[in-house]
Image: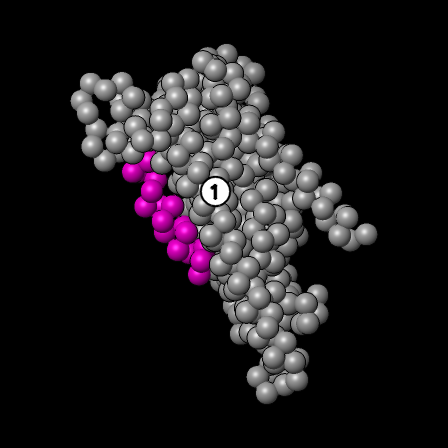
Amino acid sequence: MSLLDRPAGVPELPGTPGAPGAPGTSGAAGTAAGTARRGAVGTVVLLALLGLTVLASLALGARDVAPADVWAALVSPVPGDNDHLVVRELRLPRTLIGLVGGAALGAAGALVQGVTRNPIADPGLLGINAGASLAVVVAIAALGVGSVGGYLWFAFAGAAVAALLVHGAASRGFEGATPVKLALVGAAVTATCTSLVSVVLLTDRNTLDEYRFWQVGSLVGRSLPVLATVLPFVLVGLVLALAAARVLNALALGDDVARGLGVDVARGRLLVVVSVVLLCGSAVSLVGPIAFVGLVVPHVARLLVGPDHRWTVPLSALAGPVLLLTADVLGRLVAGPAEVEAGLVVAVLGATVLLALVRRTRSVAA
């Protein structure tokens, strides 16, 4: 990638087009201004969509509740009112969980795609989902854990250990944790953990019955105390993700150029990995290993604002809850009065969106 093609927000080298005092400064400023305008428009659009999905999540289901009653249930609940009880006790917790889990998965997906320079990467590429799954299976089979609250810390610890193992192994040797080494080591850790999970599940039917409900991914059965436990980790992860955005812009130019711009490449990648561990580890422990959110929403963000990670990371954090809550609402409606788990609906919606983006990219390229 040439310097002329660099993502917006990356510092320019002296004497290059667009650098201060060099020809093309006005063009670079125009590009930055255009990115900011698109980012502002994208933020407004996604906030509006997020508001609509939150309202739908609170109002729609086996028992529909009018928007006015939803508002009344939130601000002035009436004891004994069935609609208010449904909104406050059942739908509000799963909506808040969808907001937090979707934001974490979306931002983590943008970070992973940026640090690996791979547009089809998702947090599972660093072994996070597989590590969390193995820890949950061990918790069920060896310790008899049988609730989402019980899985929480095991899933988070498994995700963290797997991601740090991947980064540690990839950091060894020449050039440290390059994108290719991260992907290869992540694939190896994922394959190993998945094999161990299969061995346990094939020999223990009870563990299989418990594990499959967590593994498919859902917003049901999670309580507000569980959300309160992971929320601090998500908030810290989001702060680190925003701080890592400039580093990702520099890394997108290649390691040598990033070093020339004064970026500590190894420390920058470690910052991204720590942020991904906090975000995806929290989300996976909370809603299960839902894969397509982290894969699809960064593409939507880049479609809105381009490759500048200072915008794609926060917009991915907004688009993630939109996708996850939409899937949850559709899961309630398509099979009512029963429900389809959000993880299954996300897979269908995510695949559809991804195919549409691929077709659009091909048509533009043609």
Residue at image point 52% right, 64% down: 36
Residue at image point 21% right, 28% down: 77
Confirm whether residue 61 shows in the render. yes
SS assignment at label 1: helix
**Prevailing secondary structure of the magenta residues:** helix
**Residue on which disc 1 sits:** 49
Extreme right residue here? 366
Q: Position of residue 319 (x, y in %)?
A: 50, 44
**In the rendered view of the protein, which quadrant contains the N terminus?**
bottom right
Q: Is 355 covered by the magenta stretch?
A: no
Q: Return the residue nearer the eye: 13 or 198.
A: 13
Extreme left residue here? 79
Other-residue count near label 1 (Cα within 10 Å), few / some / many at <14 / 14–19 / ≥20? some
Q: Return the residue nearer the eye: 105 or 300.
A: 300
Q: Return the residue nearer the eye: 239 or 42.
A: 42
Q: Position of residue 358 (x, y in %)?
A: 71, 44
Q: Amino acid at mark 1?
A: Leu
Up-down relation of residue 338 to residue 357 (above or below): above
Residue at image point 72% right, 46% down: 360
Up-down relation of residue 81 to residue 273 (above or below): above
Extreme bottom residue here? 21
Residue at image point 36% right, 46% down: 233
Q: Position of residue 179 (x, y in %)?
A: 63, 54
Tell me which segment is drawn in magenta: 227-243
Q: Return the residue nearer the eye: 281 or 333.
A: 333
Confirm whether residue 282 shows in the render. no
Q: Position of residue 118 (x, y in %)?
A: 65, 50
Left or right side of 352 for 287: left
